[in-house]
Amino acid sequence: MHIPAPGDPLPAPRSPSGSDVVFTADFASAAQWVAGRSWAYPDGGPENPDDDKLDHLVSDADYSRSGVFRARRRPDGRWNTGLLTTEGSRQGFMVRSGDVLQARVRLPRQVGAWPAIWTWRDGGQEIDVFEYHPDNPDLLEFTNHVRGAGDYYQDPAVRPGAWVDLRTEFGVRSVVWWVNGVRAFADTRGVGRDWRAHLIVNLSVSAGRYHPRPAAQTTEMSYEVRDLVVRRPSGAARPATETATGTATGTGDGSGGPGAREDGRRRDEQRPV
């Protein structure tokens, strides 16, 4: 676990020299994002209980399309939850080696909420830009599932209801996570030169194995994502399906579906804190 020392002279994050914005998230865009299904869930969803989730994915725009990701309790004990992914969308955007993702998030307040921004393709390729559980109120989780690295980041600025600025550099040799302008963790593993994956933004609900379920009186939870952009070094090769704005002329590759490995697991391990 990394805990920043007060007054530590850490370098501020910088945009890569000569980088282009290749993706600016418009959560309302059906061309950019598919709502309520993902091949990271068994059979594309809507549920994934083996990953300690009470989720029941829904495509209702109120759960995700405004950038506020919601979860609401169902009569059967599960929760309707919001998820957006670029996987299977018309643009089919994928983040790639060397890209830098930035986003601003407002953390949820309710215990049991499990927000995340992460990547996925063909049964794996998962990098967790962040995960958060309000029962550990000052802790963010960062994980490279591609090459088996991760860390926790503890800071008083991380707390329920707080706005947090996130930045993740998907380096070939090291993935680097920044929080509010402070370098939080560099894994020295990286993703490799040919890595690529779709983006997922969602709010899950913990089922109690590693983090508590929501309190009985809790019926709704939410968190918010703003200003999500992806930058790419200028001159980096783009596939024929992508343009400089992240739009696509085809469906893209690696979008999952019946040909993807459907193991339904988001991670190769989960660690209680």
Image (cartoon, rainbow, N blue to C red):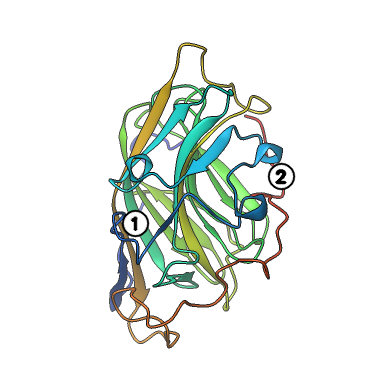
Amino acid at pointer 1: Gln
Q: Secondary structure at mark 1?
A: strand
Looking at the rendered structure, which numbered label has been put on residue 269? 2
Q: Nearer the viewer, residue 155 or 35?
A: 35
Looking at the rendered structure, which numbered label has been put on residue 5? none
> What residue is rendered at 46% in x and 77% in y?
251
Q: Nearer the viewer, residue 53 or 3?
A: 53
**Residue 52 can be seen, yes or no:** yes
Give the side of residue 136 with respect to residue 22, left or right: right
Instruction: Report how far apart the C-alphas of labels 2 and 1 lie in the structure.
Output: 26 Å
Mark 1 closeness class: few <14, some 14–19, many ≥20 residues within 10 Å: some
Residue lying at the far front in this picture: please name it: 75
**Looking at the rendering, which quadrant does residue 68 occupy?**
top left
Q: Which residue is mark 1?
A: 102
Amino acid at pointer 2: Glu
Q: Nearer the viewer, residue 227 or 220?
A: 220
Q: Secondary structure at mark 2?
A: loop
Q: Nearer the viewer, residue 148 or 188?
A: 148
Q: Is residue 187 above or below residue 198?
A: above
Give the side of residue 261 with respect to residue 200, left or right: right
> What residue is rendered at 68% in x and 27% in y?
209
